[in-house]
Image (cartoon, rainbow, N blue to C red):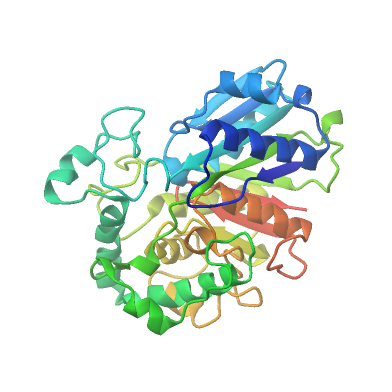
Amino acid sequence: MVGIGATEFSKAAGRSETQLACEAIVAALSDAGLDASDVDGVVSYTIDPVEEAELVRAVGFQELTWSSRVPYGGAGSQATLLHAAAAVTSGAARAVVVWRAIKARSGTRFGGAAVPRSPTSAHAGTSAAQWSAPYGALTPASWIALLATRYMETFGVTNEDFGRAVVQLRAHAATNPEAHYFGRPLSLEEHQQSRWIAEPGIRRADCCQESDGAVALIVTSADEPVAAAATTPVRILAVTGSALNGHEVASDHYVPDIGDFPESRALGNRLFAHAGLGRDDVDVALIYDAFSPVLLMQLESLGFCGPGEAKDLIGDDGLAVTGVLPCNPNGGLIGEAYIHGLNLTLEAVRQLRGTAANQVRAARTALVAATRSGVLLGT
């Protein structure tokens, strides 16, 4: 990855998703020291509203030889890098822009109730919600609450345990000028006073942001002349995905154990095997935290601790930049913004460049994981 760019993260961008995407891409090109004519590939999400043809005209791309979209929303966020790496490695493209533009607050709110019916709906990509919606599972929070309740019952985890993670994420956000909660840390008491969204697992403070904004990344081959970027490149050590039989985009209500993430387990094992690294080699982790229970469940499935042990790993400062596993130092999706998980990748690159707001000392290896897609990055 040779270039990164982003807009501000807000609750009311005041401009279109296409404008946001263009701003982030132009910033990434400038960061990489590249021109729009150097780009010949683009990758985004199936539910991103920005059309490739619009980007060609607006940014000034001359010829695209690769274009693809990734399903699964935030859980598939890191698979955009898998597509980009596949294009570059195969020779199908030389420089690929990955982008996500979203107006999840001032546009179609991602926290709202929706029954997917078409590729343009807010929670598109699955038909499973038609079976759960009649029983009240209408929103992302309610989908995850069912999984969280099973997880809590199995391992004796409480909402206070989730709150200890949130407190640390909010501490990170409080010292990150780009974060929604900049200057606004949260105590455990305040977390426990926030209203219930889906009792007993998810309070308001356990939920990620609904944000407006865009993020763009540029992937090239280290052997290509266009990789002579203005900043030190970050290497993709391994990238993969894992979508198992019986799993849906977000609901997963029909798998044998809804309190487990076997896809994250498979993902982690494959990533570390491909990179030839162990969990102890990770200097900083960026874990998809759309809701705080998902963070704890992934820490266990990815192999950083045993089943039910994430609450102990987190403790009171386990996720701090000086903790046992520095995690989401930007504040995560809960504290910084929700750009469908791609802002976690942005933070990983900044950490490895040494330019992050909350810098992990001597960070050389970063993991970005989003339940069904993940990447290991290194310097």
Image-based side of 206 in relation to 87, left or right: left
Q: Is residue 217 above or below residue 264?
A: above
Image-based side of 78 in relation to 28, left or right: left
Q: Residue at x 49, y 56 (%)?
A: 288
Q: Position of residue 39 (x, y in %)?
A: 73, 25
Of residue 310 and residue 34, the one placed in the foreground of this image is 34
Q: Position of residue 79 (x, y in %)?
A: 54, 39
Q: Position of residue 52 (x, y in %)?
A: 57, 22
Residue 228, image quadrant: top right
Q: Residue furthest left?
A: 134
Of residue 30 and residue 123, the one placed in the foreground of this image is 30
The N terminus lies in which quarter of the figure? top right
Answer whether residue 195 is visible to the viewer in this image: yes
Q: Is residue 86 above or below residue 188?
A: above
Of residue 22 and residue 35, the one placed in the foreground of this image is 22
Q: Residue at x 53, y 45 (%)?
A: 13
Q: Is residue 189 above or below residue 15?
A: below
Answer whether residue 224 is visible to the viewer in this image: no
User: For the image shown, how many numbered marks are present on the structure?
Assistant: 0
Q: Residue at x 24, y 52 (%)?
A: 256
Q: Is residue 314 above or below residue 377?
A: below
Q: Position of residue 284 (x, y in %)?
A: 64, 64
Residue 188, image quadrant: bottom left
